[in-house]
């Protein structure tokens, strides 16, 4: 385990608070062992963190870009140095196998290094005015305090995404990690940023017990100092928080769930299609927002595709995420396991057939392929956050498109074809944030504008986040006397 300073404290105003008397056990989803006792924070802790972030904001916003750049680069070096600590922590706390853990660490380091330079982006525009003698500037300014909700599933890299985008553009942060990953999506970030030398109050973390996010969220929504909410999580929670943001007239960025289709056209390379699908559907045991949920495969190759995919799926190593080579680890908790079981059982009761999988060993649910799934089965349209994939043969790309578009979600999609023109023409027609031609639905580089539309939310990552975490203020200067009508 990494040398955490103390699990039972929050990080507020550059200090580890006194140990909280209220704590909860943070459990390993594979072994059920207690990884740490963690502080069960309250609204008062959140308020103290907001006050600290508010006090730190003017100096952080005014800090010269070169100075801020050095801090982000130092943080990247620390993450790189502690990589093996974080691989072990992600396995223990979130059931993440080493392949995905190492991906998350690399991704976070790259994001920190790229964001280090964003302070040098142009700060706005000089505008032409119709008024003689008027000089006008549209200047981008940070918002103030941003409150971040980080999820447990891509705990480490999504927590870094939650904080780095706002902070790189001059905002200060209060981070509330998911109760399923208070260390890897919260407290370890504080350790890194403290060691890197980020000024006190610029970054704060408040943890809370299971089911107790409400009072922390109350503090965020009711404080006039919190100017934006940066949320990653389910569409249901996002919708509820968006309603609150509307009432409080606060900005909110929503990175939500998805129901992500992969189209396999008749000219696709079969082996590439099988490998792309197995990775897209089952990596991190299907607990990534961008995992493939449904494959729409041309009927002419469907039988061969299913046979090869089933063989590949059965070969994926399952079990202890801390063991080298494991690909499929446990689901995060019993609730998640029960939902996956229920969705598969409902589909089978309605006539679906399990090609492979469909059983659990502890919380490790076998990667599962379903065919003949009726449209009435919830798994055919609702995000099921686990290793369950539907394969549906289609007669032509038109039918594939109409099936793929029949979802309220709009996160990502993939198209496999040897014909780039055909791929681009189909990609144009998707109503989602990200389409990958000849790639898995799951692809995300820190520089790219990840994000969704419709029920998958809004907001874009990479440097595109300047739109979400700054606002444009107009300043004009007029030389000479203006003529007014009164
Ligand atoms: P969730 O909505 O249950 O929880 C997300 C966060 O919301 C957690 O921090 C939780 O503590 C908080 N929360 C829950 N109830 C709350 C309430 N009543 N008030 C205030 N806060 C509350 O989601 P989850 O199950 O933790 O995460 C999985 C979901 O997140 C999936 O739907 C997945 O697709 C989505 N996700 C999306 C992205 C993306 O980038 N689009 C990335 C990762 C996960």
Image (cartoon, rainbow, N blue to C red):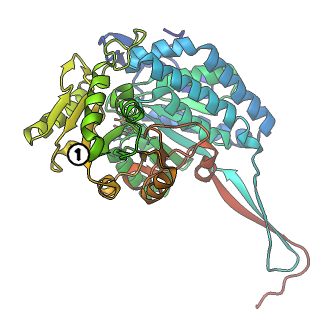
Q: Going by the picture, which residue comes out furthest to the right?
A: 480
Residue labelled 1 has its Cβ within 8 Å of some atom of ligand 1: no
Foreground of the two, 281 or 268: 268
116 sits left or right of 13 in the view: right
395 sits left or right of 460 in the view: left
Give the x, y percent position of residue 454.
Answer: 40, 56
Residue at figure coordinates x 25%, y 23% from the top left:
365
Image-quarter location of ligand 1: top left
Residue at figure coordinates x 37%, y 35% from the top left:
270
Disc 1 marks which residue? 380
The image shows residue 394, relative to residue 194, as above or below, that is below
Residue 21 visible in the current orientation: no
61 sits left or right of 9 in the view: right
Q: Name which quarter of the figure residue 291 lies in.
A: top left
Residue at figure coordinates x 52%, y 41% from the top left:
147
Quadrant (top left, top right, bottom left, bottom right) of the C terminus: bottom right
The image shows residue 395, relative to residue 31, as above or below, that is below
Give the x, y percent position of residue 208.
Answer: 40, 28
Give the x, y percent position of residue 23.
Answer: 37, 19
**Secondary-structure class at tag 1:** helix
Foreground of the two, 385 or 266: 266
């Amino acid at each position: 385990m990494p040398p955490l300073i103390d699990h039972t404290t929050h990080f507020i105003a550059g200090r580890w608070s006194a140990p909280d008397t209220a704590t909860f056990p943070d459990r390993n989803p594979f072994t059920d062992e207690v990884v740490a006792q963690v502080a069960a924070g309250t609204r008062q802790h959140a308020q103290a963190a907001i006050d600290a972030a508010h006090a730190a904001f003017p100096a952080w916003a005014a800090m010269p870009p070169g100075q801020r750049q050095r801090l982000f680069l130092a943080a990247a070096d620390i993450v790189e140095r502690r990589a093996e600590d974080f691989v072990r922590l992600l396995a223990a706390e979130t059931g993440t196998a080493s392949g995905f853990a190492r991906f998350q660490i690399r991704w976070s380091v790259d994001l920190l290094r790229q964001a280090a330079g964003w302070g040098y982006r142009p700060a706005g525009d000089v505008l032409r005015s119709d008024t003689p003698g008027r000089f006008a500037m549209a200047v981008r300014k940070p918002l103030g305090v941003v409150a971040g909700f980080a999820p447990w599933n891509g705990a480490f890299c999504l927590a870094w995404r939650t904080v780095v985008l706002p902070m790189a553009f001059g905002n200060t942060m209060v981070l509330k990690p998911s109760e399923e990953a208070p260390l890897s999506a919260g407290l370890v970030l504080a350790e890194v940023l403290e060691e890197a030398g980020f000024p006190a109050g610029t970054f704060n973390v408040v943890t809370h017990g299971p089911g107790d996010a409400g009072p922390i969220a109350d503090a965020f929504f009711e404080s006039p100092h919190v100017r934006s909410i940066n949320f990653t999580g389910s569409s249901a929670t996002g919708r509820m928080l968006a309603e609150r943001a509307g009432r409080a007239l606060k900005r909110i960025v929503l990175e939500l769930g998805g129901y992500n289709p992969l189209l396999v056209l008749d000219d696709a390379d079969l082996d590439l299609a099988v490998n792309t699908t197995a990775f897209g559907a089952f990596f991190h045991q299907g607990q990534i927002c961008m995992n493939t949920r449904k494959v729409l495969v041309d009927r002419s190759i469907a039988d061969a595709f299913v046979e090869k995919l089933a063989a590949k799926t059965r070969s994926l190593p399952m079990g202890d995420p801390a063991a080298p080579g494991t690909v499929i680890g446990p689901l995060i908790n019993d609730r998640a396991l029960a939902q996956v079981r229920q969705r598969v059982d409902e589909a089978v009761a309605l006539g679906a057939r399990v090609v492979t999988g469909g059983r659990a060993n502890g919380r490790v649910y076998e990667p599962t392929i379903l065919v003949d799934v009726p449209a009435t089965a919830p798994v055919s349209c609702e995000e099921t956050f686990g290793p369950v994939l539907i394969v549906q043969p289609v007669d032509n790309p038109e039918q594939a498109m109409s099936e793929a578009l029949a979802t309220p979600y709009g996160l990502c999609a993939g198209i496999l074809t040897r014909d780039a023109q055909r791929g681009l023409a189909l990609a144009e027609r998707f109503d989602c944030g990200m389409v990958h031609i000849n790639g898995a639905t799951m692809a995300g580089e820190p520089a790219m504008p990840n994000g969704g539309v419709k029920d998958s939310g809004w907001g874009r990552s990479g440097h595109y986040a300047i739109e979400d975490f700054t606002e444009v203020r107009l300043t004009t200067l007029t030389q000479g006397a203006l003529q007014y009508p009164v």
